[in-house]
Image: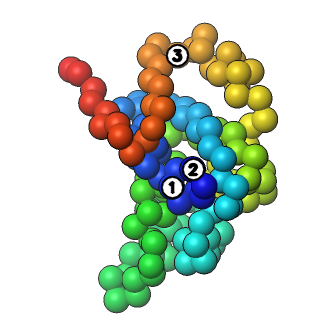
Amino acid sequence: DKTFYQVSKCLTSAKDILKKGGTIVVICGCDEQLGGKEFTEIMESTKDFRQFVEKYSDPADFTIDQWCAQNIYQAFDHAGKILVYSPGLSAEQLAVFQGIKISDCQQEIDALLPDCEHVAVIPEGPYVVGKVRS
């Protein structure tokens, strides 16, 4: 979680098991901010999945790292909200793409739990494949 680029892995895992409109809480360091130049430009230039698709859907105009941004925007589009605890990212950086910065993880989780029917904890995003039983 040195960059938000790496956070895409946990968001993808969470999205696959999250009910539409649910909440994701992400705890990440991001001491190297959002990520590389191209990725940062994408994340700072589009505020939601619809805008991302409008700007980056032309195959003739492919931008490096847009696939990662797409995964992140798909998670944001699926979730009702994504709360992010990250000492390395400012509220302003996250707000550009509708991330919500939190400063007290336990307080936010305590506030969410009474309304949650199910909770999943994903300690390491790249190593989890979420499945929902029917």
Where residue 42 sits, quadrant-wise, is bottom right
* Frontmost residue, 61 versus 87: 87
Q: State the separation of the CA atoms marked 1 and 2.
A: 5 Å
Residue hosting label 1: 6
Residue farthest to the top, as pictured = 114
Name the kind of residue labelled 1 in the image. Gln
Pointers 1 and 2 in contact (C-beta within 8 Å): yes
Q: Could you tell me residue 105's position as x and y percent?
A: 70, 28
Provide the secondary structure element on which disc 3 rests: loop
Residue hosting label 3: 116
Name the kind of residue labelled 3 in the image. Cys
Which label lies toward us, 2 or 3?
A: 2
Q: Is residue 76 visible?
A: yes
Q: State the separation of the CA atoms marked 3 and 1.
A: 27 Å
Determine crowd level at label 1: few under 14, some 14-19, many 20+ residues with C-alpha closer than 10 A: some
- What number of labels is visible? 3
First-in-chain label (1 vs 2)? 2
Where residue 108 sits, quadrant-wise, is top right
Determine crowd level at label 2: few under 14, some 14-19, many 20+ residues with C-alpha closer than 10 A: many
Which label sits on residue 107? none
Q: Could you tell me residue 60's position as x and y percent?
A: 34, 89
Q: Is residue 32 above or below residue 39?
A: above
Name the kind of residue labelled 2 in the image. Asp
Q: Which residue appears at 60% of the width and 55% of the height?
A: 2
Provide the secondary structure element on which disc 2 rests: loop
Which label sits on residue 1? 2
* Quadrant occupied by the C terminus: top left
- Decide if residue 4 is on the left or right side of residue 19: right
Which label lies toward us, 3 or 1?
A: 1
- Decide if residue 102 is on the left or right side of residue 119: right
Provide the secondary structure element on which disc 1 rests: helix
Pointers 3 and 1 in contact (C-beta within 8 Å): no
